[in-house]
Image: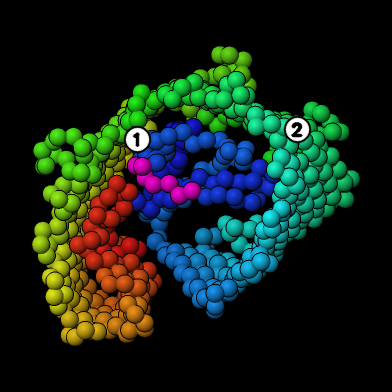
Amino acid sequence: MSGPYDLDLTGYAEGSEQVEVITRDRRQPSLVVDTVLLKRFDDYRLDYFGNAIIFNTPVPAFDGDGNPNFIRVTYELETDGDAYWVYAGEARYRVNDRIAVGYREIRSEAERSFDDRRTVRAGYVSADLGAYGKAEVEVAQTVDKDGETGLASRLGYEVKRERVTLRVGAARADEDFAEGSSLSPGSAEVNVSADWNVSPRLKITTSALYDQQMPSGNERFGVEVLPSWMINPELTISAGMRFVRLEPGDGEEPRSVPSGVLGAEWSPAALPSLALKGEVEADLTDFSHLRALLEASYQVNERVKVYTGVDWATSGSEFLDFSSADGATGTMKTGVEYRFSDDVKTFGEMRGGSQTGFAGGVAGDWEIGHWDLPGWIAGEDTRVYASIERFQPYDLDELIKLPFGVDDDEDTPQTTLAAGYLATLRDGNARLGLGAELSFKDGGYTAYGQQYWSQRAGEWTWAIENRLATADTDTQQRLRDHLRIGAALRPDEESIDALFLGGIRVERDFATDINADTAYWSAAGSWALGTDMRITAKQAGQYQAKSVGDVTGDTFVLLAQTGIERDFELEDELRLRLGVNGTLFHDPPTGQSHSGFGAEIGFVPTKNVLLAAGYNLTKVNASSVSEIYTAGPYVRLSIKLDDSLWGFFDRAGLTVPVEGESR
């Protein structure tokens, strides 16, 4: 399904999202078998004001082995509350060719009254044992807002042989282990699985699972044996048994659930383009408790594909499939995909479950670099893309007697149009990008547009980008615009370099009459005192005005900074860099001044690339200098700007920080 999926983007920090498709083992949902990181615009789009995410192509409900896919979205928020820092780091050292040790830490510096304040630290050892497999041991500690510490540990082992692959995993977290971590507080789990290749036609999967919830005292045991037999090249069947036993910690009677599993995959020779897959699991003591999965696809020809899929479970089936699901659940999709050409395809789909109704759309992506076009319009690497998609909610229960209803408060019709143009021009020295998206929903529309141009010319590189978003719906009337300009000087002799970045950001919320305007600039440079030492300097400023109704307020801060950096060669091109700086802040409206001091340590793994961590100590209000200075701890990735502007203003939509830093 491509969406739209509801996603609360209130206070969303632009460019901070990370969207992943997580695939979990269908028999052991706690086990993640694959993670795919998606790219903005290439794979998905955000509807800022409609609070939704839309994928460019439907996300399948299952992978090729029937394992369920989940969408995970994480992002940062910009709120009017007190700002706090979240930072992380990891160090890994390879002892030899087979053993590595590491340490990682994540820390949130929220106020002590908030649960978000926590620290998670872990140490681990991984070993490649050669013919004896691979192993990893990890011990973790969390510290919550009250200073209470919790411990957890994890062990993983895998060994492969010609006929069998064995996996063993164990994890435990005590009850004080902080919420929000990868393990649930007060839980313990052990799982062992083996895949046996008995013959070219016969494969057997065996698994055993034990988990315990320490707060409740509940314990669960599970075992399964699932043979699969290739009857012929067309048909593979599987049939097996699972057994799950729950022992409640409250003294209630234990419950044992034996279940039978029957599945098949069939691609008939007469219809080689047809693929069918099904699996049914039933409680052998109560056949009303069952789970069913059915998928089918048919490649009609090289242009047309028809597909359908259903995953359904009855209430009371929480013991089946080693899952913890409770209550009747079901998802369904049926659709057709038609490819007009290698560049254009369309689809129509009926959906049931978390999103119920009908969706359809058409999308095209054309490479036009080979067309005979003027050089100022298109280069060798030039693309044009466009799409339109419509989702219409319907109560399928009333419409065609399928058990999928509509929540009127959640499901509303939506039409989305998108188009863009991306080109590399002037013999690869310039890039141009134009993109727009328009969605109609909730009695109105939302629109988003992005334009950028970047160019290298001798020792200079410069770029300009603008992003505009606006919404006029029943629930929101907002506008946001952000214009940014950057320029860099990098002479060949590298004795001096300079960088300028500036921007204007406008935000209007017409419904609440809250407005904000921000303007900022930063001019920085460095001078070489030798091959290993440089003097740095920066002048920057930020003006911000906010209003709520008739109440207005503004801030204006100027910054002047100077520092020194020294490199130490470790080996080959690897260099250690140490730096210190002093900063003076001045507030012209009040006449007040503040000072700051910073220190930084980093590594230069190759020429023009720096990965560093540092700390800036100052009493200045961090929000008044948010665009030009980082107060407190930070991590910085700097790349020589004449190469990195392509990364700053590419289609990923990344926010451009000052000094080419990724913070």
| Residue 463 point in image, percent of width and height | 17, 54
The answer to whether residue 281 shows anywhere in this view is: no
The amino acid type of the residue labelled 1 equals Gln
Residue closest to the eye, 611 or 368: 368
Query: At 65% from the left edge and 56% from the top edge, which residue is drawn?
Result: 184
Query: At 37% from the left edge and 73% from the top edge, which residue is drawn?
Result: 613
Question: What element does badge 1 sit on?
Answer: loop
**Residue wearing tag 2:** 262
In which quarter of the view is residue 470 placed?
top left
- The magenta-colored residue range is 36-42
In the rendered structure, the answer to whether residue 301 lies left or right of residue 154 reads: left
The answer to whether residue 338 shows anywhere in this view is: yes
**Picture layout, residue 10 above or below residue 358:** below
Query: At 63% from the left edge and 68% from the top edge, which residue is drawn?
Result: 130
Which label sits in the foreground, 1 or 2?
A: 2
The amino acid type of the residue labelled 2 equals Leu
Question: What element does badge 2 sit on?
Answer: strand
The colour mode here is: rainbow
Please say whether residue 384 is one of the residues in the magenta stretch: no
Residue closest to the eye, 331 or 62: 62
In the rendered structure, the answer to whether residue 543 lies left or right of residue 615 reads: left
| Residue 409 point in image, percent of width and height | 49, 28
Please say whether residue 40 is one of the residues in the magenta stretch: yes
Residue closest to the eye, 363 or 543: 363
**Residue wearing tag 1:** 476
Marks 1 and 2, how far apart in space? 51 Å
Which numbered marker is on residue 317? none
Q: Residues within 10 Å of mark 1 (few under 14, many from 20)?
A: some
In the rendered structure, the answer to whether residue 86 lies left or right of residue 596 reads: right
| Residue 575 point in image, percent of width and height | 33, 80
Q: Are marks 1 and 2 in contact (CB under 8 Å)?
A: no
